[in-house]
Image (spheres, grey):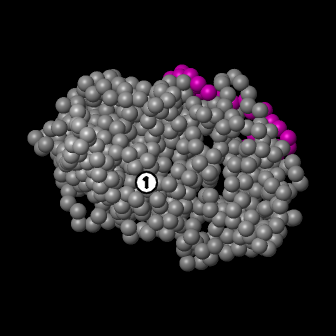
Amino acid sequence: MFFVMAFLRTNILATLAVMTLCAAGWSVAARAGGGPENVFLVVNPQSRASLSIANHFARLRQIPAGNILHLSWDPKAETTDIDTFRLQILMPILQAIDGRRLAGQIDYVVYSSDFPWGINLEGDFRKFQEAMQREQPPGAKPGDAPAKPEWPKLLTPVGSLTGLTYLWPAVRAVHPDYLQLQTNWYMRQSAPELCDAPSRAFRGARQYDRQGEVVRANGRRYMLSVMLGVTAGRGNSPAEAIGYLTRSAAADGTHPAGTIYFVQNGDIRSKVRQDRFTAAVDELKKLRVAAEVIEGTVPLNKSDVQGAMMGTAAFDWKASGSTILPGAICEHFTSFGGVMSAGAGQTPLSEFLRYGAAGSSGTVTEPYSIPDKFPTAMLQVHYARGCSLAEAFYQSVFGPYQLLIVGDPLCQPWADIPKVDVAGIEPGAAVRGGATLKPVATVPKGAAVDHFELFVDGLRAAETKPNEPIALSTVRLADGYHELRVVAVGAGPIETQGRRIIPITTANHGRKIEASVVTKPPLQADKPITIAAKSPGAIGILVIQGHRIVARIAGEQGQAEIAPNVLGAGPVELRVVGLGDGGATTHALAAPIELTIQ
């Protein structure tokens, strides 16, 4: 029994996520993509709100189960220090990505709610200050006293969860690069020509140089990072968060007909960046997207707000009489828009989300009205060219270390999304041996597809050019349920994706499994859920949510009870696995069990 339980604890998840692909002889391509397969979703299992929001987002966005990390955090700890962030949040995320063989595939690290939105950087600041003071000034002679430079006041010692995750290499290395106000080289650095800068897709595996060009070496790497919601303090309720995520998912590819409003006034918050508003409006009109510069603090009595950029410390959206349309990015340049603790001053970013915006942002401490810490007007232009919400934000802010971004990172209202069909295999097919997949795609406006990518159970397995087949071998996969994803990647700089998800079953090794829900609906938070399973010849059976084990059954059959609060509310997907004792091909995988928990 000791051997069995040790095996269950240490080997099964790595076996399911990695060994099947490696054993099948597939090589993971170096290219990445900008869709659900490239999202790493981080969930706090100590928070029902975090679990529930993540459940809905994973279903809305079809996030692969292996791309979900349950990472415990005290929900009451809205802020933390940099060393704790590095040790308990950032490093476990990076280690999980590497351990699941997702490095090079992940572009987005997305947090559900109830993680610390603000990070105290004083520990790093002390180290950086001490290093500066040890350095001799240029031309100093041996024996001269070291310089005692002052740390720049404008680099205040607080960072955001999303900004520091985006800048992960420098943060991990405890290097002051992450504090530079032009540290984001994914953003084009030619400031005078920003409105003419092309938009492009983001890839976590790519390196960028100081001019924003992709290079093979000596550049900087990043990972886009967004919070789905903040449900503590001045944040939103879980229902509000689920509401705006649902609206934004439905907005993809709709090419909405609303208007983007740039609101200017005499406030310093507006004056420091409104000189770019007119150029942004001109670019948007070239894209046939309605845009307008208006005077005031907030759009008044507008029924068509498809986006808003404002400069004001306080506003009341309900009193404005305006309506935010699905997919809109709305934000305001102010000191404490990202400070989410109860009782903080100024209007928080959550006000926009409460009324239906797909995303918003704000700084988590006093930024001293420095434009480089906030998005430029190009935010709306990148978005209207078809970039995702996260790509648009990070292409438009030079120094993001204090900027908290909240919303749906994948929302793409103006994307031309390929429609994918796959010949050679049918959904639900039983496959023995191999199959030949023949993908085709049509793209709106006659655009071309650059290539197709095949994902097996969430892991990228192959890549092919248009009109080339993909050979699929299943002989070294576990018997039972598997999910194929064929993703078309557009040929343009935005690299827009479309996908076809194809469930199949494999039967090469004579292994079987049955699994069902014993508990009758409705499934409620105070009522245990019982799962029954049978897998002849198994040494044990696991029930898995995302990438964590939530129940175990000893032997080849039995029942397991799961407390609903462990799973969270909303749509829940469970995988049931019968374990063999001879490696990946001796396991058996049941079709996912889909539940709805009230």
483 over 243 or under it: above or below = above
Q: Quadrant of residue 413?
A: top left
Q: Position of residue 310 (x, y in %)?
A: 22, 43
User: Quick one: 528 or 25, which is closer to the camera?
Assistant: 25
User: Quick one: 439 or 510, which is closer to the camera?
Assistant: 510
Q: Tell me the SS state at disc 1.
A: loop
153 over 259 or under it: above or below = below
Q: Is residue 439 magenta?
A: yes
Can residue 128 be spotted in the picture? Answer: yes
Outermost residue on the front side: it is 143
Q: Which residues are magenta?
A: 423-451
Q: Quadrant of residue 583?
A: bottom right
Q: Is residue 66 magenta?
A: no
Q: Determine which residue is flagged by label 1.
A: 228
Picture residue at 83% right of the left edge, 44% below the top: 475
Image quarter (top left, top right, bottom left or bottom right) of the N terminus: bottom right
Q: Position of residue 328 (x, y in %)?
A: 36, 43
Can residue 250 be spotted in the picture? Answer: no
Q: Is residue 333 left or right of residue 184?
A: left
17 over 391 or under it: above or below = below
Q: Is residue 97 left or right of residue 409?
A: right
Instruction: Report the number of discs.
Output: 1
The three-letter code of the residue at mark 1 reads Leu
417 over 354 or under it: above or below = above
Picture residue at 42% right of the left edge, 53% below the top: 227
Picture residue at 79% right of the left edge, 53% below the top: 584
Q: Position of residue 176 (x, y in %)?
A: 34, 45
Q: Quadrant of residue 474?
A: top right
Q: Position of residue 216 (x, y in %)?
A: 51, 28
